[in-house]
Image (cartoon, coloured by chain):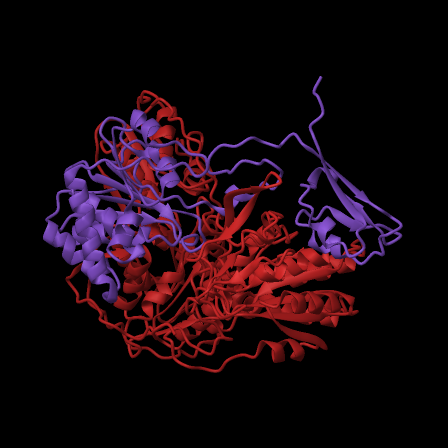
Amino acid sequence: MKEAVGAVEVPDAGERRIMMGNEAFARGIWEAGARVATAYPGTPSTEILQNLGTYPPEDVHAQWATNEKVALDVAIGAALAGVRAATAMKHVGLNVASDSLMSQSYMGVNAGLVLIVCDDPGIHSSQNEQDTRLFGRLAQVPVLEPSDAQEALDLTRLAFEISEEFDTPVIVRSTTRLSHTRSPVRLGERSKPPERSFVNDSVKNVALPAHARIRHPLVIEREARLGEYASSPELARVEKGTGGLGIVTLGSAYTYVKEVLPEASILKLGMPLPLPERALREFSDSVERVIVVEELEPVIEQAMCALGLAVEGKAFFPRTGEFSPERVRAGLQEAGVLEPRPEAVALPIDPLPRPPVLCAGCPHMSSYMAMRALGARVMGDIGCYTLAALEPLSAIDSCVAMGCSIGLAAGVAKAGTETRPIVATLGDSTFLHSGIPPLIDAVYNQADISVLILDNHTVAMTGGQDHAATGRTLRGEPTHRVDLEQLVRATGVEWVRKVDSYDIAALYHACRDATEYTGVAAVLSDRPCVLDPVKIQGPPFEVEAAGCTACQACMNLSCPAISWTAEIMDGRHKVEIDPIGCMGCSLCVQVCPSDCIRATANGANA
Amino acid sequence: MSASSRLSDRAIAPQATPTNVLVVGVGGQGVVMVSRVLAKLCERNGLDIKQSEVHGMAKRGGVVFSHVRFGERVYSPTIPEGEADIVLAMEWAEGLRWLPFLKRESGGLIADTQRIVPPFSCRNRKRGALHGYQTMGLEELEEVVARVVAVDATGVASEVGNRRAANTVLLGVLSSMLDFDPSEWREVVAEVVPPKTIEANLLGFERGREWALQETRAELPTPPEPERPTHAADRVELEIVEAWCKGCDICVKVCPERCLELNGSQVAVLRDPAACSGCRVCEWLCPDLAIHVRILPAQEEH
């Protein structure tokens, strides 16, 4: 088993360490004296809570939540009860948590409450690239934006102070680039925030219409004070350069501007929202031309336009994708600020396509082979298994967001237009995250669908975190283990079957029976992830070349351990199994029509 | 209350050009380990550093890369195109992918000659289909890159008794091109690798370093497979004898291309003739011998 993460050594204050952005956020939460921190894993935010789990348990409760809204609610509760609390999530996680954030903004906090929200410009590992600053504006809460690991730590600490001073939840916005870049950080002491306890104040703490009407004007007034605070020179730093050009920038974009145009005058915003109006006006007055360089949405640019300031920005820089030194250079060239560089001669390279694939032995392979064989209309969900939408499995017809599969399937069934069996497929952790209410809904409304729960006993996509059905906490300690089968039955599903994912025939038969059943039927496809919590490595299999007919039926599994040999039969390549990559799941043995895959000499499983 | 003073006193430092090393490979090869060694060396030497990678696909056989930039002051976490001093590639085709990042005049490519063929390259099941992994060899490469060091790191690692030490062999080669003390390299390697493998990894590091300092030239990496005649133009004909088919569904289930189906009278029919690759699985597995696959030569083109 993986070692329990338990507290290790906490680096001393004053030390200079090279830290990933996410480690620095964790350090900032710890240094701020936070006592409660909770999150649902989500790339690129996952390492924040994972890392916080290495700090002493007596300092901070670090725990995995079932979803982002629960995480925020737990943090709100802790803040109301008087201790500093934090939560971390990816940008789309804030969609889930936003319901609580919107009213929490009116209520304010007692002790500091900070949300670290990690955006994903460039969509490295997400379903969209929404800009969290827009959420900050909607919720009327401050948004801080660091540009390196040191600022990640400093601004996280500061966020707790702002939260308490202005009585508001605070968002610290990160991006994939910042979260996953290592750079030097000077560490500080853990602070001792003032001791507080729950304050009886129902107008503030109970979100009733009458109370909210009292609070809303206060929120608007708070926004104005925060905007003035955001204009302070520490948070709106002017770096005086040469020439009449002024660049307003923030976050990672700042580092790219410094890289390609170090001599420019820069206004670097540490807190873009509420808008630092005074600082923006003063900076505009001090230069002849202002260009805003911001990733994703033109939040600052449009706000400056609304202030009546002459400003340029998205005319030169894209609203989509991640910035880079090249993109910022190209934009500044288009703006006529930088001279175009001579075009380098293109290299004669045709990059090899290498898309991500499911792992060798991944139990999801057989589940989607069964879906293929059934000819089902499959509503997918968020997880590693979304890769089954691609060739060669091509077995997912739709995927929207976390926990959507069951609702989608119920909708397809109610539409009454589908002739194929309708199946929702989702992982164990996704089911716990947001799959339970739609399952109850499907049973309640008598939808004729099947639900295939891909139970691999971990949150695999984000690197193997624990959840409520693994029986272990974030710190690796034993805890109650949710029984998924009982949970499914408790929602009213009467037809439930649990099958070994490595038995394709049994899995196929279970799925076929489920789709023939009228009403909601559930199949649990059960096998641990081959990577986490332990890497599973059984004796490998091998192909008897003489028996292989090069039909390549095994290659439909999408197993990365199977590839072509140089030997040709009837114009097609025979196949071989990489003995290092193969972990011995036997799925290829089960699908091979010519029965030519055998256990290796040192393997006992045939 | 004031914002942390640290925010303000980190203003502009004198510009010094950072050293840029781009480490690339395939998920699971240890790209991140290699760049962590560089990060630790910089930490020891009090240098500014940014080391940037994107997680998530690292375990899934996808493209993995890590930007490492160090010097007096580093801003951008990613290396601008055309500004890498060194591209360290743990796989041949990955080295080629990232060549546009290399400095044209002076950049050096260190590339492991091993080839990891992705499943995507073996997807075309048509008769005579070519392998998707077709990349340029060392001689062509030397024409476009200032300096190429091609090393069979996996082979060297196997000689020292641990195939997985290939990345420390490459670190040994890299150490000959960067200005850090050799003893520091060894200490950091020992810190970063799993305790049980320290000995093999240090040996791998030494071999790599010696190899690079001797300037031995690597043997030409072998192409992934010989070229061969193509059958792509052949036509496939599938005959299903209706009278013999009892609709058992076996051929429909086993067809790798999913191009068969049962019609309204429960007889197997070829639903998608263009998808049929002529693999004969249905022919061989039909219990009633109802299917015949014929491969016909290409028709003359007019």
Foreground residue among B275 and A134: B275
Chain coloured red: A
Q: Percent from the top left, x then y, of residue A127?
A: 53, 50
Foreground residue among B136 and B7: B136
Whether residue A147 is visible to the viewer of this picture, yes or no, is no
| Residue most extreme to the front | A546
Q: In which quarter of the image is residue B60?
A: bottom left
Left or right of residue A501, residue B210 in this image: left
Foreground residue among A330 and B62: B62
Left or right of residue B143, residue A358 in this image: right
Question: Going 25% across and 60% down the picture, which residue do you hit?
Answer: B193
Question: Going 67% across and 55% down the picture, which residue do you hit?
Answer: A372
Q: In which quarter of the image is residue A321?
A: top left
Q: Percent from the top left, x then y, of residue A402?
A: 56, 60
Chain coloured purple: B
Check the image and report above or below for A569 versus A112: above
Whether residue B213 is visible to the viewer of this picture, yes or no, is yes
Quadrant that contains the C terminus of chain A: bottom right
Foreground residue among B62 and A505: A505
Left or right of residue A466, residue B44 in this image: left
